[in-house]
């Protein structure tokens, strides 16, 4: 990975700022008037129920989708992210939920895809060493980097995708469900990694359904609900608060379930009349 | 036991540190790795080698002229024309698309050379250049139709097949065919020019030396960087074996006329394409687009430009193949590029091991595949069989090749090798 000095970002500077971002797919408005600020050295968790628009937002930032309205300010400049290459050039790296790896290529080729060393005479040795270094920093359990990605397990592929996002020394990393496919130890490694990346002064946006992971690393938790902002929370906010923001009601399936369990426990403790 | 494991872990190269990976060293290891690869569906050149052995034994037993130096030299002349077209097909198959109009484009290019050079008396090089440029422009048109309008290449090139054939007939007009002058450099190149023996022997030796030198340099760099590398002995062995085989082939061909320069050009193009596909950023993006188009796009690859280069290269190679076959036949006729040229070129690429499904193939598959196809054609011609039988047999061979490709693909998927 890079040394700290190469990061010219001032700590706590605003890296990314979204204002009024909207996106429609036909008649469905996936995102409406989304505002989001991300500072350098900060982990922002993006949470929300299925269909809340988290992945759409990430894809807009990655240049996969174009927003219908709203402005994106990156490092004080208003930018247009009209294709993935534009995002990568600015320093926005993305780990997609579906990972977006080429299964017919080997690990090294996937990590360096689109930014190979020495375009007219690929430097395979240097790329392989760099790939091993990145993977070892992630404590990856990948037996060989010269096997096609098709032969790797889900967790190994996830690690390859994360390693790829770090290669470019980005200013902002977007992680869409980074721990969903990982085992216990690797989840911890990824969370460690997110902290390490943050401590280097990078900005991190992470989508997760796992509240435990979110609380463990996030500095702020941004809740989306049905494509709208629905509150910003500190990681020490109660589960109750978060869940009601996510589902939009204090009376929801999660709270009812919790109550029911609570009730039945109390019920069983009380002697029958 | 434990200490042993630890020692191994500390001294092992970077890419052999994981204890689960088996390192295949030495001859036994290489054999085992090869068998594993084949069993998992990574067939490489194996089907071609087996196919060639069967073809050679069958035809040789039916007609002893088949493996004579004279026939093989003819075979190499014939290989080069459709082989160049097949090389273009490899490019387009790499990105998972197809060009069905290569035959028409080749015929059109030969007609252009005939009209511009013979009828309008342009210099030969300018006529050739113009034909190549127009070929490339046809490919660019397909790419625009594909990129802008999402027209499937299968349909656009099928339309192109007819349209370009029409252009060819229009260009040749009522005369129907134009004879290229005998004795001109272009026709000599296509019919008689062979390498002097000394040049051929030297080229064969240089090839072996270059193969060894590049592999040796890579191995040295890998070792220096702390990666596993092949041993000096195995590299030397490989270089020597390649040199000996090439020298023997050259010696055998030199019993007759020798190695055709046209075949030399074809092989040079194959080697150049192989380098471009495996060792450049462009080649990597061709592989990536063929493997997973959306992933390639998200990695920042300009997918449209990649398709554009693939279509343009394919059509340009088709035009080049057409010019070579005009030189070979010393004429540009209405029949040029029709009939089985299209299918032979596609069949050659597939038989050689380029997948119809994209993202998998090498430039060498054009070379290997066209030798198989041309051997069959040559053998059947020697047996004096009618073209009806020839078409049927070539069709059957293509079907078998595609079946092998599909089965191998299924096996690769179940073995997790994409």
Image (spheres, coloured by chain):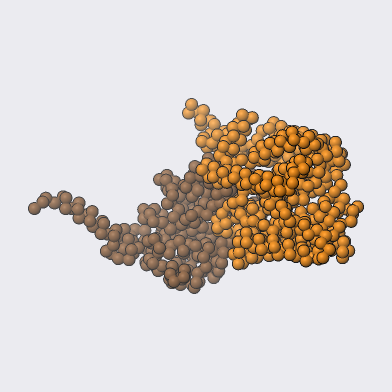
Chain colours: A brown, B orange
Rendering quarter of residue B295: bottom right
Residue A123 in view of the camera: no
Quick check: B208 above or below B418?
Answer: above
Residue B182, percent from left and from top = 90, 53
Residue most extreme to the right:
B183
User: Compared with residue B220, is residue A195 higher up or lower down, i.e. above or below?
Assistant: below
Residue furthest out toward the left: A273
In-image side of B226 versus B186 (left or right): left
- Tell me which residue sits at (62%, 59%) in the image: B154
B248 sits left or right of B15 in the view: right
Taking the spot 66% from the left edge, 55% from the top edge, the residue there is B92
Q: Which residue lies at the image location 51% right of the left edge and 36% below the top edge?
A: B20
Left or right of A213 in this view: A70? right
Question: What residue lies at 77% left-to-right and 36% top-to-bottom?
Answer: B63
Q: Is there any visible trace of residue A141 in the rendered image?
A: yes
Looking at the picture, does residue A76 appear above or below residue B29? below
Expressed as whole percent of the image width and height from the top left, the position of residue A123 reads: 66, 47
Counting the numbered discs, the total is 0
Q: Which percent across, then down, holds residue B218?
A: 68, 41
Residue A60: percent from left, percent from top? 50, 65
A3 or B252, which lies in front? B252
Asked if residue B321 is positioned above or below residue B214 in the image, the reply reads below
Seen from the viewer's position, the closer of residues B340 and A82 is B340
Question: Which of B303/A205 is in front?
Answer: B303
């Amino acid at each position: 990975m890079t040394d700290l000095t190469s990061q010219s970002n001032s700590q706590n500077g605003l890296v990314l700022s979204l204002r009024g971002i909207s996106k429609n797919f036909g008649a469905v408005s996936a995102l409406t008037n989304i505002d989001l600020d991300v500072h350098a050295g900060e982990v922002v968790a993006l949470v929300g129920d299925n269909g809340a628009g988290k992945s759409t937002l990430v894809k807009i930032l990655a240049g996969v989708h174009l927003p219908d309205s709203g402005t994106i300010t990156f490092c004080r400049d208003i930018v247009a992210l009209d294709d993935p290459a534009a995002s990568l050039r600015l320093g926005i790296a993305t780990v997609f939920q579906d990972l977006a790896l080429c299964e017919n290529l080997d690990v090294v080729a996937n990590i360096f895809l689109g930014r190979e060393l020495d375009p007219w005479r690929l430097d395979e040795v240097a790329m392989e060493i760099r790939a091993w270094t990145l993977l070892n920093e992630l404590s990856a359990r990948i037996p060989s980097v010269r096997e096609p990605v098709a032969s790797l397990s889900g967790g190994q592929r996830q690690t390859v995708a994360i390693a790829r996002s770090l290669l470019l020394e980005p200013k902002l990393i977007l992680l869409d469900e980074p721990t969903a496919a990982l085992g216990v130890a690797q989840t911890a490694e990824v969370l460690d990694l997110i902290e390490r990346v943050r401590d280097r002064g990078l900005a991190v946006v992470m989508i997760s359904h796992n509240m435990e992971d979110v609380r463990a690393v996030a500095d702020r938790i941004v809740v989306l609900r049905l494509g709208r902002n629905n509150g910003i929370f500190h990681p020490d906010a109660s589960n109750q608060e978060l869940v009601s923001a996510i589902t939009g009601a204090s009376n929801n399936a999660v709270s009812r379930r919790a109550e029911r369990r609570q009730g039945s426990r109390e019920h069983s403790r009380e002697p029958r009349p | 036991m434990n200490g042993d494991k630890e020692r191994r872990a500390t001294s092992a190269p970077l890419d052999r540190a994981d204890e689960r990976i088996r390192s295949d060293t030495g001859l036994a290891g290489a054999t085992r790795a090869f068998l594993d690869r084949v069993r998992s569906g990574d067939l490489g050149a194996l089907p071609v080698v087996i196919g060639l052995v069967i073809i050679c034994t069958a035809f040789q037993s039916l007609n002893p002229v088949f493996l004579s130096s004279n026939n093989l030299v003819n075979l190499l002349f014939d290989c080069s024309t459709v082989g160049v077209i097949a090389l273009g097909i490899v490019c387009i198959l790499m990105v998972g698309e197809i060009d069905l109009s290569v035959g028409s484009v080749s015929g059109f290019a030969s007609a252009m050379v005939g009209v511009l050079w013979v009828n309008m008396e342009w210099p030969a090089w300018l006529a050739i250049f113009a034909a190549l440029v127009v070929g490339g422009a046809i490919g660019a048109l397909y790419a625009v139709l594909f990129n802008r309008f999402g027209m499937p290449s299968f349909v656009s090139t099928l339309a192109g097949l007819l349209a370009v054939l029409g252009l060819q007939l229009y260009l040749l007009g009522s005369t129907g065919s134009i004879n290229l002058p005998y004795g001109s450099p272009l026709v000599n190149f296509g019919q008689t020019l062979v390498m002097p023996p000394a040049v051929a022997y030297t080229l064969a030796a240089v090839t072996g030396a270059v193969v060894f030198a590049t592999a040796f340099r890579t191995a040295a760099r890998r070792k220096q960087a702390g990666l596993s590398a092949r041993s000096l002995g195995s590299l030397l062995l490989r270089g020597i074996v390649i040199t000996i085989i090439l020298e023997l082939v050259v010696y055998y061909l030199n019993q007759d006329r020798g190695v055709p320069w046209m075949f030399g050009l074809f092989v040079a193009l194959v080697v150049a394409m192989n380098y471009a596909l495996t060792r450049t950023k462009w080649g990597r993006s061709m592989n990536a687009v063929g493997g997973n188009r959306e992933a390639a796009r998200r990695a920042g690859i300009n997918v449209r430009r990649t398709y554009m280069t693939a279509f343009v290269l394919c059509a340009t190679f088709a035009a080049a193949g057409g010019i070579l076959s005009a030189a070979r036949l010393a004429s540009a006729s209405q029949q040029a590029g029709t009939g089985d040229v299209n299918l032979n070129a596609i069949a050659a690429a597939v038989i050689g091991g380029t997948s119809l499904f994209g993202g998998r193939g090498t430039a060498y598959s054009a070379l290997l595949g066209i030798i198989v196809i041309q051997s069959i054609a040559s053998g059947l011609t020697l047996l004096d069989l009618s073209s009806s039988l020839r078409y049927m047999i070539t069709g059957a061979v293509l079907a078998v090749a595609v079946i092998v490709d599909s089965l191998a693909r299924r096996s690769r998927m179940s073995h997790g090798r994409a």
